[in-house]
Amino acid sequence: MGGGRLEPVSRELNKNSVVLYANSFARRYRFSYSVCTMMLTACVTLNSCWPAIGRGIGTVFTDHIWDFAGSWPILHHLGFELRGTVSGSRMTHYRPEDYDPVTHRTHEPILVCRPEHFERLRSAISEAEGLPGT
């Protein structure tokens, strides 16, 4: 990155890659470390920006539109996709039906990553059983 321009960062997905997540995801889901490493932070907004500067291969969240709306066009510009981990559907624009009408959280975890990494990262995500709040 130079001259104030955002340019795609080439990243290979391997066991040393990092996917960022926040507590909201960890309350209901698990991630298999056989694919790569996860880093827990407390801020979905920040997690949505880190992959754009090459600080992580992606992020996964179950949060509100306002938590990631600002980074969404930047991520799209850099070749990242936002996709549902259950449906596999790509989020290309705001659709009210993608969010719970009471909590305003996404109905399913959203994985932000490059298209070529989606299936492998998605395979590492499973619903946690027996945890509080599940």
Image (tube, grey):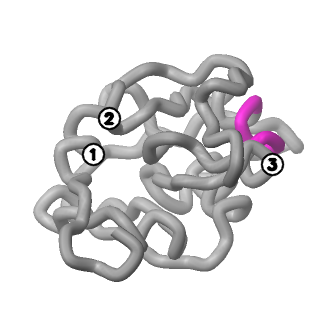
User: Residue at the right extreme?
Assistant: 4
Tag 3: amino acid = Trp
Residue on which disc 1 sits: 121
- Please state the extent of the stretch shown in magenta in the rendering: 69-73
In space, the residues marked 1 and 3 are separated at their CA atoms by 24 Å
Q: Is residue 127 visible?
A: yes
Residue at screen point 74% across, 35% down: 74
Mark drawn on residue 66: 3
- Kind of element beneath mark 2: loop
Q: Which residue is mark 2?
A: 86
Name the image quarter holding residue 114: top left
Q: Which comes sooner in the sequence, label 2 or label 3?
A: 3
- In 3D space, how far apart are the residues under numbered discs 1 and 2 (Cα atoms)? 12 Å
- Whole-number angstrom distance, CA of label 2 to CA of label 3: 21 Å
Position of 57 with respect to 122 (left or right) is: right
User: Looking at the picture, how far across and down is residue 82, in whole percent?
Assistant: 53, 33
Residue sitting at x 11%, y 63%: 34
